[in-house]
Structure formats: structure tokens, C-alpha cells
Image (cartoon, rainbow, N blue to C red):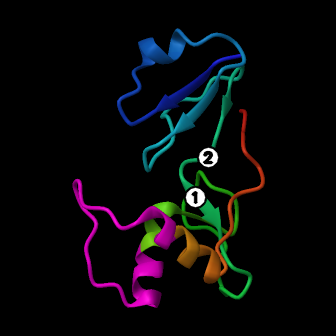
Amino acid sequence: MQIWLVGDGLSEVEHSKASKGTIFIPFSQFPPKKLRKDCFYHYTPAMATPLSLENLHCCENWLPSRVMSAWRIAGIIHALEGWNERECGNIMSNIEKVWEASLRHGFQPLKTITTST
């Protein structure tokens, strides 16, 4: 079994070179454009939303219900915490600080780690 970390630049040629049973873990906002039936795909960076968040069914069509992308969650956490700094380019907030705030506001790591077509 192989594990591949992939971004938006994954080409069809590279994708086809993966052996059967490979696990693809995307680190970009969007999943690979095509999925192979003989491989497994982790969700894009995301978390389960708090149960207190109402009227939420789906944010991105490639994620399960009540799961939100890390990018959307970051915006919500920044607003809830009153953080004014902007994260762009090489400027990032302290990962531990953001992780703790996410958990404190009820966001949770995903329990399901892989999907297959």
C-alpha cells in the first residue's frame, strides 16, 4: 500500500502510475478531479461542524453532510475569536492556537478517514 500526498497539480499521468490500493491524501482545497475505483481518497482538509450550528446540511459537494472545509472554518474561528490578522502567503497563525480554538468552538476531527468510489 502506498500513501500519496497530492495537490491541485496532480496530473492524469501521475494519477495513473499509482498502484492498486493507493491512498490519496489531498492537501489542497479541492479533491482530485478524477477518482479511481481501485484506490482510496481521504477527504480534503475539513472538520465536522458543531451540533449547535443550525441549518447546515452541506457546504461543499465533495464532503459529507455537516462537514466543512478547513478554509471556511478558519474564517469562522477568526471571527469568533476576534482575530484581525490575515493569513496569506507565508503568513500563518499559530497552528496550536487555531486547533485549540476550533475544538473549543465545537469543531471536531473527522472520524471517517478514507473514501473510495
List x then y, in percent, for residue 112. Answer: 77, 50
Height in image: 72 above or below 64?
below
Which residue range is magenta in the image? 75-98
> Residue, x 71% and y 88% (percent of image)?
52
> Residue, x 63% and y 23% (percent of image)?
36
- Residue bearing mark 2: 43
SS at mark 1? strand
Height in image: 100 above or below 47?
below
Q: How many residues crowd mark 1 within 10 Å: few (<14), some (14–19), many (20+)?
A: some
Height in image: 90 above or below 58?
above
The image quadrant that residue 12 belongs to is: top left
Nearer to me, 43 or 77: 77
> Residue, x 51% and y 31% (percent of image)?
5
Pick the quarter of the image with the C terminus: top right
SS at mark 2? loop
Give the amino acid type for the residue marked by disc 1 in the picture: Ala
Determine if the magenta segment contains residue 33: no
Give the amino acid type for the residue marked by disc 2 in the picture: Tyr
Q: How many residues crowd mark 2 within 10 Å: few (<14), some (14–19), many (20+)?
A: many
Nearer to me, 61 or 7: 7
List x then y, in percent, for residue 66. Answer: 68, 69
Whole-angstrom CA distance, mark 1 to mark 2, is: 7 Å
Pick the quarter of the image with the N terminus: top right
- Is the Cβ of the residue at disc 1 closer than 8 Å to that at disc 2? yes
List x then y, in percent, for residue 82. Answer: 38, 90
Determine if the magenta segment contains residue 85: yes
The image quadrant that residue 78 belongs to is: bottom left
- Residue bearing mark 1: 46
